[in-house]
Amino acid sequence: MFVEFVKGLGITLRQVFRKPTTVNYPEEKRPPSARARWRHKLLRHEDGLERCIGCSLCAGACPAHCINVVAADNTDEDRKSPGERYAAVYEINMLRCIFCGYCEDACPTGAIVLGPDYELADFDRASFIYGKDRLLVPEPGEVAREKKRLVEREIG
Amino acid sequence: MSEELVTLTIDGVTVRTAPGTLLVEAAAQAGILIPVYCYHPKLAPVGACRMCLVEVEGAPKLIASCTTPVREGMVVYTDNQRVRKAREGILEFLLVHHPLDCPVCDKGGECPLQDFTYQFGPSRSRFRYPKRHWDKPLQIGPNILLDRERCIMCFRCVRFCEEISHHRQLGVFQRGNNQEIGTFPGQPFDSRFAGNTIELCPVGALTGAPTRFFGRTWEIGHTPSVCTGCSTGCNIRVDSRHGSEVVRLWSRENPATDDGWLCDPGRFGYGFVNDGRLEEPLVESDGQCVPATWQQAIARAGAVLEQHAKAGTLGILTSPRMTSEELFSVSKLARTVLKVPHLDHTARYVHPAAVDLRAFAASAGFTPGTLRDIQDARQIITIGVDLSREQPVTDLRVKKAVTQKGAELVVVDAEELELSAFARHTVLWQPGDEAATVMSLANAVASPSEANGMQAVGELLRQEGPKVVLLGWRVGESPDAERIGESLAALAQALGPGTRCVTILRHCNSRGALDLGVHPAEDPVSGRGMSGEEMLRAACEGRIRALWLLGEEPLQDADPDLVRRAMENLEALVFQGWSLPSWLERVPDAALPSTTFAEMDGTFTNTHGRVQRIFRAIRPKGKSRPGWEIVNDLAQALGHPFDSRTVEAVFEEMCAATPAYRGLSWNSLGVAGRESQADSAAAAPAAAQG
Ligand code: SF4
Ligand code: SF4
Ligand code: SF4
Ligand code: SF4
Ligand code: FES
C-alpha cells in the first residue's frame, strides 16, 4: 500500500519538473503540421489568372454541402481564368465545413486548397461565409509557397 | 393487323417482337442495354457511330443493331468478348480528339459519352499526338452554341433539321479528321426548333446560349410541368437550382400533346419567372406605390372591389395564362360574392359569337378532335391559323403526318404560310371574304360541278380517310360571324360526319377559361356582361369605374390608345400578377403579387381539352402567392370565406361545378394529364349563345 503511494507520487514528481507541452497561446504559436487542413485558399496560376474554373466539382464532393459556386463566361476583355468558364461566386460556409479536404481532392485544377490558418473565430454567423474576396489569394507568389507546403505535406 | 411476331434470342433471352423492329429496340424491350449515340427513336437510322455493334450468329462481322431489323430465329450477343472489344475500340476512337473538358461542359453528369466510357471504355488513350483544336464555343444561332471539339459525328442534329423541323440549317462539312458540323454561309441556325438539338446531341457539342453554365446537372432539381408559351400544352421538365431559380426547361414527351419536342420561344421563354417580379404587395399612397403587408393590400383591394361591385361599376379582366384553379376562384368570387357580370379573359376575337371557337366548331357539326388525331389523318385542313407561329410544335406534327405518313394538307388562309410548302393546295382568301371562301371550298368538296376553280382541292378532300380540320382565330376575326358559321357548317357537312376539328386557341389556358365560363356570355344570373373591349370603352365613358386586372398580358392586344384613355378614366385599379406590366402607366390602388407556373401547383387545359397538372418547382419569389389563395383572402375580407383551402380542394370543387371536367380527380391526372370530356364542346354552344 505504501509502496504504491510512493510510486504514484514519483510519477507526479517526474511530471512536475518536465518541460510543459502547452504554449502561451495566443502570444506564442506553434507551427502547424505540414498536413494541417484549415482555412481554404483559392490559388492563382503563375500568370495571375485564377485557377478555379467554376466547375462545382468541389461542391459536388463536399459532404457538408457548404460550397456554393455560380459560374460565368470568360471574355477576352475581362479574363478571370484560362478557358471558357470561371467562378463568379465562390462561397464556403466555414461553420458547416468539417475540413475533410475532399474539395481539394476533387478540384481538377488544384484551385482550392486547405491551408494552415486555423484562427477562424468570429462574432457573427454571416461572417463565416467566405466569398472570393477572402478565399482568393491576392497574388501568384502564394502559389510557390503553397506548392512547397503541399510537397512537404506529401513527404511529411 | 394480326401480324406474326418474330422470335429471336438476345443474350440467351427469348424475345418476341413485331417484324420490322430494330435489334436495338428489341433488346431494350428485353431490358438489355445496347449503348447508342446516333440511334434515336424519332429519327431514321443511319448507323453512323458504330457504338451499337453486336454479334449475330452466322454473320461474319459485327453488325450495327440500330440499322438491323429483327429476323426469325436470330441469335444475338450483346456482351461477349468480341463485342466488348469493339465497343472499347469505338470509344477510344471517339475520344481521340475529344477535349474531355467535362468540368466546364454543360453536358457533364448527364453525358452518354462519360457514362459509356466508364461502363465500356478503355481507361486510357493510346493516342500520343496533340489533339485537334478548334475555336470554341461558336455561336451558330441566337440560342445555340457549337463546340466542334466535343462533337462525335452522330448527325442527330442534322437529321433533326432534315427530317423533323425541315429547317435545313445544319450540314456536315469536310471529311475524316476534319469533319465538322456547321451552318451554311450567311444562314444562322435560327430555326424556332433549334433548341431540340441541344437535347438530341448526345454530348456537349450543342449547348443552349441562354442556359449556358446553368449549374451542374447533379445540382439541378427536376419538376414536371407544362409550357405556358401557347395552347399546345407541351409537357416540360422544369430544371431549377437551389429551389429558387429556374435554370432550364427540357422536354418531357407526351404523345397526346407535344410528341417529344418543344419550340424555342417556349423552351427559352422562362425569364419572367426569375426576373422583374413583383415581390411584395403594394398599395397606393399619395400617388405612389408603397410596399404593404398582405393584410393591408387585401383590405384595400377588397374595399375597392366591394364598393364598385355594389355600384355596378366594376369590371374584371383575367388572363388565360392563369391556372384553372385561379380562374375558377376569380369567377366564383365574381359570380357569387361580388355578383359582377362583367368578367372576361383576354385573347378575344372581334366577334363575340366567335369567342368560343370550339363551340363555334361544334355547332358547325364537327366532331371535337385532339392534336393526336393529326398523326392518323389522311387529310388535314388548316383554316385561319398559322401553326408554325401560333403552335409551333403542332406544326411539327403536321409536317410529320405529311412527310412520314403521306397525309395531304390543305391550307386556307389570307396568305401563303410556311406550311404551304407542305400543302397540296393553299386556298387564299381576301380579308373580309373568309366566309365566302370557306363556302366555296365546301361547295367544291360537296359537288364537283360547283367547284369553280377548286376542282383539285374538292377532289382531294372527297377522298376517303380520317380528316382533321384545324381552326384558328383568324376565322373568328371575320367580320361576319354568322356567315362564317354557315360556311363552316357546310364544310363540315361536305367533309362528312366523322371529320374531327381541333380549335387552335392562343394561350396556355385559353381553353380552361372557356370551359370555366370566364367570359361574359355565361353569367347565370344577370345574363351577358361586358367583354374586355366593351369594359375598356365603358371605362372611357365612365360606366366602368374600377377594374380588377389579373395577369400581365390582358390588354396587350387591345388598341393602346383605348387602353390609355380607359386607365386614365378609372377611379380605382386592383392589379394582380407576377410583374407590373410595362404598359400599365397608372398607379394601381393595390398590387397583389401572384406566383408564376413554376412556383405553384395547378392545372392548365390545352387547346383540345387535355387537363394537365403543373407542379411547384421553386419557392415563391418574395411574398408572392398563388392566385387562388389571394382570392380566398379577398373572399374572407368580403365576409364570404371559401371552403376550399388547398389547391386540390379547389380543383375538386371546380370539377364538380364544371360539366367538362366531371369525372376528373386531382390524383388521376398524374404527370401526363387526362382528356376532359370529349362531348363538352358539343354541350357548350347553347350556353355560349345564351
Ligand atoms: S473541407 Fe470538406 S467540408 Fe470543408 S468545404 Fe471542403 S469538402 Fe466541404
Ligand atoms: S461531352 Fe461529355 S465527355 Fe465530352 S467534355 Fe462534355 S461531359 Fe465530358
Ligand atoms: S453536334 Fe451533337 S448531335 Fe450534332 S453530330 Fe455532333 S455530337 Fe451529334
Ligand atoms: S409549341 Fe407552345 S406549348 Fe409547345 S413548347 Fe412551343 S410555346 Fe410551349
Ligand atoms: S447507334 Fe448504331 S451506329 Fe450509332
Image: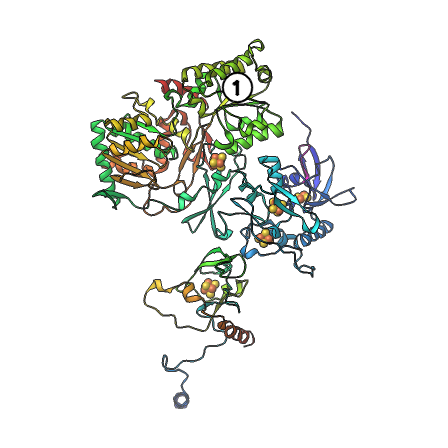
> Which residue is the extreme one toward the top?
B449
Q: How many marks?
A: 1
Q: Classify residue B262 as left or right of residue B627.
A: right
State the image coordinates of residue B346 (x, y, percent, origin top left): 36, 30
B20 part of magenta stretch: yes
Q: Quadrant of residue B311?
A: top left
State the image coordinates of residue B81 (x, y, percent, origin top left): 73, 51
Q: Classify residue B45 as left or right of residue B105.
A: right
Vertical relation: B492 (above or below) B533: above
Res. B680 in view = no
State the image coordinates of residue B195 (x, y, percent, origin top left): 53, 42
Res. B293 in view = yes
Secondary structure type for disc 1: loop
Mark 1 nearby-residue class (10 Å; few <14, some 14–19, many ≥20): many
Q: How is the image coloured?
A: rainbow
Q: Nearer the viewer, residue A141 or B274?
A: A141
Q: Which residues are magenta?
A: B18-23
Q: Nearer the viewer, residue A117 or B283?
A: B283
A47 part of magenta stretch: no
Disc 1 marks which residue?
Answer: B499
Q: Residue at point 65% right, 25% down?
A: B1
Q: Quadrant of residue B40?
A: top right
Q: Is mark 1 within 8 Å of ligand 4?
A: no
Q: Nearer the viewer, residue B29 or B689?
A: B689
The subunit carrying tag 1 is: B
Identified by mark 1, the residue type is Thr
Q: Quadrant of the C terminus of chain B?
A: top left
> Which residue is the extreme one toward the front?
B186
Q: Residue at point 60% right, 18% down?
A: B460
Q: Quarter of the picture for ligand 5?
A: top right
